[in-house]
């Protein structure tokens, strides 16, 4: 370990088997998303596991982290070459040894990787299902130190799933070939019937099952029936609303992909195509251009999207009826993986039903044809429904939420007037107003310059290594750097999304950019920029949501939200609200804060009645600190006035 890495390692001191230490050391995060920690510990305890977690929920971390903590190799079965390559690149960037075997690698390199796997060189090894079932593969895996198997896109094993693949059925042989090795199945979309089929087909034993909520609260579902005359205009309005942002447009046929790209070009919107009949080089080049932000609009068939790891997609637009709820949920779910608001717009036509009927009629197996018709009737019911879209999606997957209205779909009153002709002039005014608000939120021009410089550096670094830009850092991490403005390696390691290995690789260059772009006016009393989570929490507070509601919307623990609010109170960004803590409890907490100080919460908790929670103490203590800071400033101002 070189001097730089040794110094960084000393900044994070924790036991090597501590999952939280690994989370921060490799991923740069201080807390898990919902269910992640439980899944990680389940795999570390060698349990068979079945996980259903929506796109963007952090599935890959659930098996990558326990693999990183093991001395053996986790074997990941994935049907997607692009996903294998991206994940191995990301793991390597984080200092976790990983490799993949697929048809893109020559035989000599394949032999080298197999030998490495047999010697325990890798923590994760990615294989396709076709390669796994080869006799030769089974033979050399039996001489390799395997910690557990991961079946990604596990819904493909079920005939009841929307993307059944016969080769997946052979994965059931894993249990007989490797009876003592745990198996974990992961999927983003599976009904209750499909979940049971996954467990049965893979012969999972006493499987731990983790089903995350299917509600993606940051997504806005908008469904409109159109015709050949109106669909193009609505598509243009949707794209203009998301001007400058990354967008996916799904088209039903290869012919329509070409027509749509040409139509958008005529309207001054540059778009690139993606479909199965393009040669592999062109497809890969277009995908890379879109992923790296060189092209913002990609028009593709359903061949595009599986394994795409781009978090900042602001809209997914469908130009025809998907064949099932699962397909729509999976494709629409590629929007807003960074947790920020995004639009899922379905512009369908009556003629789509004839196209779907044609495809269903070509299915030779009668049972599969019947299942296809069932999926067709379900998606028709979804677009015709007059009830909450989010609720309908959740119910389809077997989840019954307590709420009845989401305020994030066209049925529940989500703002969609920009799609109407009468709203065109209004949209232009709102666009200008939105630009003014966005610039105000940047706080000053220096922050915008810093963000642009970081993006430019990231692109150059990604090009130099031949990697997608998001593998270096996702946009969310760049935003966190701009918000924190770290001036030391220690401060950089406290930025969410920057782990030990990446800090060692890129830390000095990032710090150089930040130091060179610090605004002259910034001083010890200058307000810091708000982080994205803080801005989102403030927005939801202003909209009238409670802490519990904000935690559900942002998919976080209430404790995390209260801590964020406490920081905002102390910084003077928001005022303390009486509804958070009643006056009697607030008085008791403030008295103890005056006696014991506010640096530590435990002594305060011990001195207060049991019915007062840590969250309440945290909020009142933050308000006490804010008042003390204000008093100190006033005293200083008075002293300066007297001396003058």
Image (cartoon, rainbow, N blue to C red):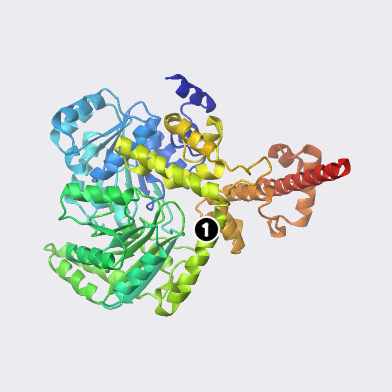
Look at the picture and state if 438 lies above or below 132: below
Q: What is the tally of numbered marks visible in this picture?
A: 1
Residue furthest right as drawn: 642
Q: Is residue 605 left or right of 642 when viewed as pictured?
A: left
Q: SS at mark 1? A: helix
Image-quadrant location for residue 455? top left
Residue 484 vs residue 525, the one in the foreground: 525
Q: Is residue 47 left or right of 414 when viewed as pictured?
A: left
Q: Position of residue 143 (x, y in %)?
A: 22, 25
* Residue sitting at x 34%, y 57%: 192
Image-quadrant location for residue 363? bottom left
Q: Position of residue 349 (x, y in %)?
A: 27, 75
Image-quadrant location for residue 250? bottom left
* Residue sitting at x 74%, y 57%: 582
Q: Position of residue 189 (x, y in %)?
A: 33, 55
Look at the picture and state if 386 lies above or below 276: below
Q: Is residue 289 visible?
A: yes
Q: Position of residue 508 (x, y in %)?
A: 47, 30
- In which quadrant is the N terminus drawn? top left
Q: Is residue 620 left or right of 297 when viewed as pictured?
A: right
- In which quadrant is the C terminus drawn? top right
Q: Is residue 108 left or right of 311 when viewed as pictured?
A: left
* Residue sitting at x 43%, y 47%: 475
Residue 109 vs residue 474, the one in the foreground: 474
Residue 548 vs residue 420, the one in the foreground: 420
Residue highlighted by disc 1: 438
Residue 516 vs residue 150, the one in the foreground: 516
Q: Is residue 405 visible?
A: no
Could you classify mark 1 by the number of other residues whose Cα lies within 10 Å: few (under 14), some (14-19), or many (20 or more)?
A: few
């Amino acid at each position: 370990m070189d001097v730089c890495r040794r110094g960084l390692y000393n900044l994070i001191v924790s036991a090597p088997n501590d999952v939280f230490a690994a989370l921060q050391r490799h991923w740069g995060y201080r807390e898990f998303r919902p269910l992640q920690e439980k899944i990680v510990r389940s795999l570390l305890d060698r349990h068979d596991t079945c996980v259903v977690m929506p796109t963007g929920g952090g599935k890959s971390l659930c098996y990558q982290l326990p693999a990183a903590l093991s001395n053996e190799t986790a074997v990941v079965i994935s049907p997607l070459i692009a996903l294998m390559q991206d994940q191995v690149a990301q793991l390597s960037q984080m200092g976790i040894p990983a490799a993949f075997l697929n048809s893109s690698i020559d035989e000599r390199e394949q032999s080298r990787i197999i030998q490495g796997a047999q010697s325990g060189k890798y923590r994760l090894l990615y294989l396709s299902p076709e390669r796994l079932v080869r006799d030769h593969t089974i033979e050399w895996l039996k001489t390799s130190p395997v910690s557990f198997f991961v079946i990604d896109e596990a819904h493909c094993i079920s005939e009841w799933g929307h993307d059944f693949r016969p080769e997946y059925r052979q994965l059931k042989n894993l249990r007989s070939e490797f009876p003592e090795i745990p198996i974990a199945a992961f999927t983003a979309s599976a009904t209750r019937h499909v979940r049971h089929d996954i467990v049965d087909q893979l012969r999972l034993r006493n499987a731990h099952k983790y089903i995350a909520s299917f509600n993606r609260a940051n997504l806005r579902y908008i469904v409109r029936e159109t015709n050949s005359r109106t669909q193009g205009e609505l598509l243009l309005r949707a794209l203009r609303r998301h001007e400058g942002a990354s967008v996916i447009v799904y088209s039903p046929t290869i012919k329509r992909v070409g027509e749509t790209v040409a139509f958008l070009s005529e309207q001054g919107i540059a778009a690139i195509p993606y479909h199965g009949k393009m040669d592999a080089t062109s497809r890969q080049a277009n995908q890379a251009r879109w992923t790296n932000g060189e092209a913002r609009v990609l028009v593709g068939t359903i061949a595009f999207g599986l394994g795409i790891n781009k978090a900042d997609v602001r809209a997914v637009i469908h130009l025809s009826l998907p064949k099932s709820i699962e397909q729509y949920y999976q494709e629409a779910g590629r929007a807003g993986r960074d947790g920020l608001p995004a639009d899922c717009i379905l512009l369908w036509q009556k003629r789509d039903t004839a196209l779907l009927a044609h495809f269903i009629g070509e299915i030779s197996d009668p049972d599969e044809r019947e299942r296809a018709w069932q999926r067709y009737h379900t998606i028709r019911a979804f677009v015709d429904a007059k009830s909450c879209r989010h609720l309908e999606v959740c119910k389809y997957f077997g989840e019954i939420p307590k709420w009845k209205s989401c305020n994030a779909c066209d049925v529940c009153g989500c703002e969609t007037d920009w799609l109407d002709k009468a709203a065109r002039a209004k949209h232009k005014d709102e666009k200008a107003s939105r630009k003014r608000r966005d610039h105000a939120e940047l706080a000053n021009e220096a922050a915008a310059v810093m963000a642009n410089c970081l993006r430019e550096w990231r692109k150059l670094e990604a090009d130099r290594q031949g990697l997608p830009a998001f593998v270096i850092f996702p946009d969310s991490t760049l935003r966190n750097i701009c918000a924190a403005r770290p001036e030391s390696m220690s401060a950089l390691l406290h930025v969410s999304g920057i782990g030990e290995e990446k800090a060692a690789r890129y830390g000095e260059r990032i710090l150089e950019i930040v130091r060179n772009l610090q605004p002259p006016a910034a001083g010890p009393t200058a307000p810091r920029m708000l982080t994205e989570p803080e801005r989102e929490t403030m927005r939801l507070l202003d909209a009238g949501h409670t802490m519990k509601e904000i935690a559900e919307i942002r998919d976080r623990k209430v404790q995390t939200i209260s801590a964020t609010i406490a920081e905002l109170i102390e910084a003077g960004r928001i005022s303390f609200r009486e509804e958070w803590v009643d006056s009697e409890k607030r008085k008791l907490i403030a008295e103890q804060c005056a006696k014991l100080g506010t640096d530590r919460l435990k002594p305060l908790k011990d001195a207060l009645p049991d019915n007062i929670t840590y969250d309440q103490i945290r909020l009142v203590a933050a308000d006490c600190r804010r008042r003390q800071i204000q008093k100190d400033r006033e005293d200083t101002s008075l002293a300066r006035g007297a001396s003058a």
